Image (cartoon, rainbow, N blue to C red):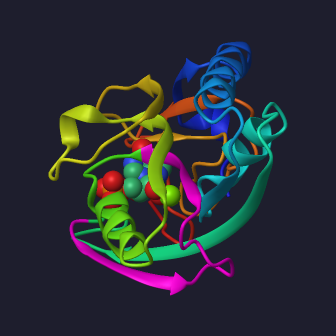
Amino acid sequence: MQDYHEFLSEVLIDEDTLQKRISELAAEINRDYAGQDLILLCILRGGMVFLVDLMRQLDVPHEVDIMAISSYGRNVRESHGNVRLTLDLQLDIRDRNVLLVEDIIDSGNTIAYVLEFLSTRMPRSLRVCSLLDKEERREVVVPIHYRGFTIPDKFVFGYGLDIDEYFRNLPFIGVVDLDKYKQPGSNG
Ligand code: IMP
Ligand code: MG
């Protein structure tokens, strides 16, 4: 695997800016759900870093669960519709307040599928909290109740988001220079 400095074209959102915004989102969630009880539902794997930082700033009592989705599209960086559940959640969400925690909403296909699927289980409420929103690429209309940042149509990595499954650990959101990035296992 390459050193990310070779293909990082810019740091789009630095660590301080991320953490400050996450505190603001947590404050909103604390206010909106005051006196209630919550299930935070993380969509693996991109949402996990965000989930962990967000939940540590919540004082609303909450349970945490995870689910996983896979999507097949025109290429590895696009989901385009064919979304499938690969890991179901464990908790019974009937009559519960559910807050989905996502890293990024791009076409919207993933979250649209998840919302439809979860709503058949009759939660009391179902909301979406997404750290990033690539608004220009939206193909289906989806509600985002808590939005961290609206970002331009660029491929980003770090803070939970991967490029070919690597670099989720970085504390900032960076933009990939796709001309300089070499896919693992390729010669060019
Ligand atoms: P959607 O179904 O098109 O909204 O895609 C959402 C999923 O695609 C996210 O949960 C990410 O896993 C992935 N994704 C979309 N854009 C990016 C990006 O810029 N970097 C890394 N992953 C991304
Ligand atoms: Mg994801």
**Of 1 and 62, the residue lying toward us:** 62
Which corner quadrant of the image does residue 126 belong to?
bottom left
Residue 36: x and y, percent?
68, 44
Q: Please provide percent x and percent y for residue 67.
A: 59, 73
Which residue is painted at 64% across and 17% down in the image? Answer: 24
Q: Classify residue 30 as left or right of residue 177.
A: right
Residue 183 x/y as whole percent: 49, 61
- In this view, 160 is above or below 164: above
Image vertical order of residue 58 relative to residue 123, above or below: above
Q: In this view, does 72 lie to the left or right of 99?
A: left
| Residue 104 visible in the snapshot | yes
* Quadrant location, the C terminus: bottom left
**Is 30 contained in the magenta span?**
no
**Whole-percent x and y of residue 91?**
68, 77
Q: In this view, does 41 lie above or below 93?
A: above
Residue numbers of the magenta segment: 80-104
Q: Quadrant of the N terminus?
A: bottom right
In the picture provided, is 15 more to the left or to the right than 88?
right
The foreground one among 170 and 16 is 16
Where, by quadrant of the figure, is residue 8 drawn?
top right
